[in-house]
Image (cartoon, helix red, strand yellow):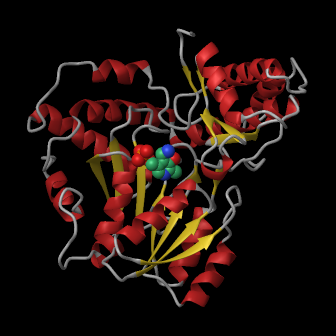
Amino acid sequence: MAEKQYLFTPGPTPVPPQVLEAMSRPIIHHRSSDFRAILESCLARLKSVYRTEGDVLLYTASGTGGMESAISNLTRPGDRVAVVSAGHFGERWAGMAKNFGCQVDELVYEWGESPAAEDLTQFLREKGGAKVVFLTHSETSTGVVADVEGLAAAAKDAGALVVVDAVSSLGAVPLETDAWGLDSVISGSQKALMTPPGLATVSVSASAWETIQKEAPCRYYFDWARTRYAQESFDPSFTPAVSIVVGLDVALGILVEEGLEHAFERHLRLGRACRAGVKAMGLELFSPDDDRSAVVTAINAPDGIDSGELVQTLRDRHGIVLAPGQGPLKGKIFRIGHIGYYDVFDITTALAGVELVLAELGADLERGVAITAALEAFEHSRV
Ligand code: PMP
């Protein structure tokens, strides 16, 4: 059994030591001046990472809780909404909206396809519009990062509000909440924000506040208006996960200090390095071979090899934790995450492990070239 763990999943992700240290300090009370100062700083930093002048609400919940808050605040049973779905998390939007009684029109793509703005324009025209369009920025199950700017413009042209799942993308790849007209963007602490799981972040635009569903609301904990009111005085309505908020503030400080543009460039280069290494050993990419795909690299398992067995063996024998395929891709692909606290040597470790175990499992591979290819791609791709 391996003792040391290398976490290369697209969430949760490794947490920097400064964040762990801050979280190990004695617990402070959530209605104290100490906590209020931290919450104020954390919310200001979140706004800069979101690139918004609007509100960003913080919930003690996983990312899915943040997604649910968007549905329960913006829709009522019977509303027509549209979902663009090209994988596991698009399907989650659709399932959730149906559970809340919405009439859901789904623009469905095969898992792994990249949604196109023109398709959405046509779809909304045919369906006669929608109150809200739900999008997924980074479809973590396939590695595709969608053109949210284009998709949002198509939805806006049709008069819809735009809600974006950016759980695995915020802080890793460019996302402009205000400039792209995004009405609500949801993220989570445990991905590119380099913090343990437990917090959901939710932006709310001025148009979203105007459309908020006020009659007979089916929500309490996730009531956006209540949360905004409480956050105005940094006095949370309910007991937040105090230690994780402390950690998130430190992590956001690291991100802001690095500079968002620099973080985006680092992720782009990590994506290039990972894809170059994978291709050099003769494996086939499942996720697109393009720079937008900078969150997670999805790779087809070689013929005759179950990707689940590869992932399990890597974890059990070497402590290297990758993500298996989900849904229809179970057994077929494996995924290397590279969001958050990663550098190129994390990529080379993951590739070395994959090469070793695939060779043991009998794959026909080019040995000894992946790491050089990855390092070269990283070095030669300063933007
Ligand atoms: N959306 C995306 C794109 C995700 O990657 C995830 C987590 N893997 C979620 C939503 C759900 O987040 P959580 O597990 O924190 O509820």
Identified at 35% across, 67% down, the residue is: 71
Q: Is residue 314 visible?
A: yes
Residue 29 percent across, percent down from the top left: 11, 32
Residue 82 lies, with reference to residue 43, above or below; the image says below
In the picture, measured across the screen, residue 45 lies left or right of residue 105, that is left
* Quarter residue 161 falls in: bottom left
Q: Position of residue 94 (x, y in %)?
A: 48, 67
Looking at the image, which residue is at 32% across and 30% down?
247
Q: Is residue 149 above or below residue 295?
A: below
- Number of numbered discs on residues: 0
Q: For the C terminus, which image quadrant?
A: top right
Q: Is residue 53 visible?
A: no
Residue drawn at x 91%, y 24% as measured from the top left: 366
Q: x%, y% of residue 264?
A: 59, 42
Quadrant location of the N terminus in the rendered image: top right
Task: Tell me the quarter of the picture where residue 38 sits.
Answer: top left
User: Is the residue 79 above or below the residue 316 in the image?
Assistant: below
Residue 56: x percent and y percent? 32, 55
Q: Quadrant of residue 367?
A: top right
